[in-house]
């Protein structure tokens, strides 16, 4: 007869074997889960001391506990078979501390205090380790409760170390050390830990959009960061500023002047782009109380204004790449798959900011790193962003381009300057920021209308604050009234779709115009121009949630995939289909639209290269949204058969 304990153990082990590896790792760290199923986790590793001593963890931990229990000396052998003696003594500050001695040589093992019977020694040592790792007050509560009651077990020692490693502050240091050593460890660029990202941008809680998260989880995190360290905490908080609402909850009113000035000076000399933007947005409202901020703010704005993203080797291009790296990996790993799109993107931007900082600090040449990202991560990022459009149709993956990022930064700074125009004074900062200035080096001169007013990456579900102006309506009416159907018929509608709230009525008028023209564009245009218009019509269908116009996009894709004179590429076809699919906000309708449209492409005339492009996109989008397999399986099967023949 099998005992209850044995039965629970069998069930527990079987359950662990069935779950994904990332979830299994989390479950094995859950003491309540292990206890419930009568499981134990044996942790075996090596503890290395600075002077070269190496001991197995279980050997060392057991010896420290025995020396503490007996108040005596315990002999152990290191990995080189040399005998050491462990006893509990005090360090230079009079704190209880395990020590290893051999032939007159002594090595301290301060972390071993967590294994001692003295609660004050345990608590003091843990707080020292937590301070060094940047573990915030609320993140210490679990371990502090245990340490006040008892010493840690051997397994808990490993869990504490993993917990302390799972902080942005510690990860930045490890990443710097690796980069200086010529290494680029993948797991440090994008950690596979939800706990890490909650510590990076704050808990999601019940927030349903970026503004709600900024005012709740992010604001709480920022307060804790600054309480932990005015300088380092403030610097870390700046990495959250992927949307203006985050900048608004980063307070510096009560921070020491020297800490603020130190951070601003560091941003001017060697900062990342997102933190520079945040520092501008945070500093402008404080110019009256802290006028000395005007000079570093001018420097920061001027850096943003003069960056040249066209070259592809500037700060905006690198921020774009690092965001793509982080967002692609979070999509592949599924770490935040159950979180809203804005939360994952906020985490991706914050992580991208930390990567950009460390590369800058160590002076690493990012040339090879740029190639690595461009070659390996863009495809999954693109697929994940297409999936996100169902819930956030006002931002599509091509808007991550560095040119658009710079324009978004300019738009945010101009908005902050307008809100604080009475504080700008009359100096060079006012000349740089005031919209009315005619100075050729003003920020306004660098703005390329309408790009600064497009929705940002975390705002794709926000409706624009205002509808179409009357003069814009007149231009649209004029273009839709042209006697022939051409790409010019829709230019104004497409260009304004990301700026203003457009009613579905306009989408229906465009749909009617396409039908009247029998979906045939009279004017000969370049392939690039037609592809842009087709994608633009798909975006219009998405932002107005017009399924009628979305169906028209499918007709155009079908027609111009067969047109011998202006056959659209598979890339253009897929982009248009996925953009237009976002007209369906419901998951079932979205899946059905994509499935039907991609079946048409898969069973149509296509080259092996086109089949490969389509199959790759199908697999990547299904990785981002597995439910899509229910409607897209037939298309993938057809492509597999074709490519395998």
Image: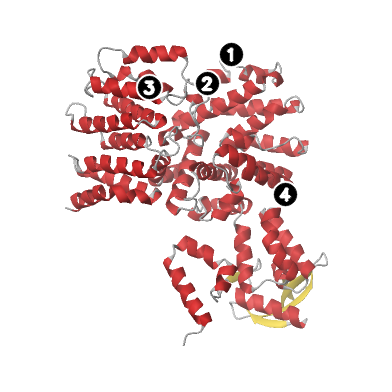
Q: CA distance from mark 2 to mark 3?
A: 32 Å
* Position of 120 relative to 393 (above/below): below
| Label located before the other in sequence (2 or 3) | 2
Q: CA distance from mark 1 to mark 3?
A: 39 Å
| Label located before the other in sequence (4 or 3) | 4
The color scheme shown is secondary structure
Residue bearing the label numbered 3: 506
Residue 492 shown left or right of residue 142 in the figure? left
Residue at 76% x, 75% y is 88
Q: x, y percentage for residue 161?
A: 62, 63
* Position of 8 relative to 420 (above/below): below
Residue at 44% x, 49% y is 331
* Position of 233 relative to 309 (above/below): below
Residue bearing the label numbered 1: 439
Residue 543 shown left or right of residue 132 in the figure? left
Q: Residue furthest bottom?
A: 1
């Amino acid at each position: 007869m099998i005992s209850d304990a044995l039965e629970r153990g069998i069930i527990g082990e079987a359950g662990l074997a069935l779950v994904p590896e990332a979830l299994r790792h989390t479950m094995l760290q859950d003491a309540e889960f292990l206890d419930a199923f009568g499981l134990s986790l044996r942790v075996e590793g090596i503890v290395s001391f600075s002077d070269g001593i190496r001991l197995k963890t279980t050997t060392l931990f057991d010896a420290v506990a025995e020396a503490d229990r007996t108040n005596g000396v315990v002999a152990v052998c290191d990995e080189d078979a040399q005998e050491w003696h462990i006893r509990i003594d005090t360090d230079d500050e009079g704190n209880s501390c395990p020590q290893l001695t051999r032939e007159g040589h002594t090595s301290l093992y301060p972390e071993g205090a967590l294994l001692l019977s003295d609660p004050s020694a345990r608590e003091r040592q843990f707080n020292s380790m937590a301070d060094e790792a940047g573990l915030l007050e609320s993140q210490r509560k679990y371990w502090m409760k245990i340490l006040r009651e008892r010493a840690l077990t051997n397994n808990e020692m490993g869990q504490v170390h993993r917990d302390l490693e799972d902080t942005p502050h510690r990860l930045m240091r490890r990443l710097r050390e690796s980069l200086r050593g010529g290494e680029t460890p993948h797991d440090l660029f994008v950690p596979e830990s939800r706990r890490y990202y909650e510590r990076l941008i704050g808990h999601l809680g019940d927030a349903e959009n970026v503004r709600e998260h900024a005012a709740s989880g992010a604001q709480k995190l920022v307060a804790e960061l600054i309480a932990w360290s005015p300088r380092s905490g403030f610097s870390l908080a700046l990495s959250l500023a992927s949307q203006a609402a985050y900048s608004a909850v980063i307070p510096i009113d009560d921070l020491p002047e020297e800490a603020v000035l130190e951070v601003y000076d560091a941003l001017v000399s060697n900062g990342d782009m997102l933190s520079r933007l945040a520092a501008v947005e945070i500093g402008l409202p404080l110019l009256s109380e802290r006028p000395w901020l005007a000079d570093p703010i001018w420097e920061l704005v001027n850096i943003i204004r003069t960056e040249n993203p066209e070259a592809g080797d500037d700060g905006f291009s690198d921020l774009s790449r690092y965001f793509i790296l982080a967002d692609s990996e979070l999509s592949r790993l599924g770490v935040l798959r159950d979180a809203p799109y804005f939360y994952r993107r906020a985490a991706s931007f914050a992580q991208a900011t930390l990567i950009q900082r460390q590369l800058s600090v160590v002076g690493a040449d990012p040339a090879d790193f740029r190639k690595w990202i461009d070659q390996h991560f863009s495809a999954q990022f693109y697929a994940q962003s297409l999936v996100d459009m169902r819930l956030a149709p006002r931002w599509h993956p091509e808007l991550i381009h560095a040119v658009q990022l710079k324009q978004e930064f300019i738009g945010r700074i101009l908005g902050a300057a307008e809100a604080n125009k009475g504080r700008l004074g009359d100096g060079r900062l006012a000349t740089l920021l005031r919209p009315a200035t005619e100075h050729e080096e003003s920020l306004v001169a660098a703005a390329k209308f309408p790009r600064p007013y497009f929705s940002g990456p975390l705002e794709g579900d926000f409706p624009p604050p205002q509808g179409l102006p009357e003069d814009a309506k007149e231009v649209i009416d004029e273009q839709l009234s042209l006697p022939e159907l051409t790409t010019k018929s829709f230019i104004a509608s497409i260009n304004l779709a990301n700026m203003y709230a457009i009613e579905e009525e306009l989408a229906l008028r465009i749909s009617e115009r396409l039908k009247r023209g029998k979906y045939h564009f009279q004017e000969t245009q370049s392939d690039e121009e037609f592809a842009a218009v087709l994608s633009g019509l798909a975006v219009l269908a998405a932002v107005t949630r017009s399924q009628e116009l979305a169906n028209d996009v499918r007709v155009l894709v079908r027609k111009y995939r067969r047109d011998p004179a202006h056959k659209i590429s598979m890339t253009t076809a897929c982009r248009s289909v996925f953009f237009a699919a976002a007209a369906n906000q419901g998951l079932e309708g979205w899946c059905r639209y994509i499935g039907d449209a991609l079946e048409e492409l898969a069973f149509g005339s296509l080259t092996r290269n086109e089949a490969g492009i389509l199959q790759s996109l199908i697999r990547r989008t299904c990785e981002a949204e597995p439910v899509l397999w229910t409607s897209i399986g037939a298309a993938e099967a057809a492509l597999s058969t074709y490519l395998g023949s």
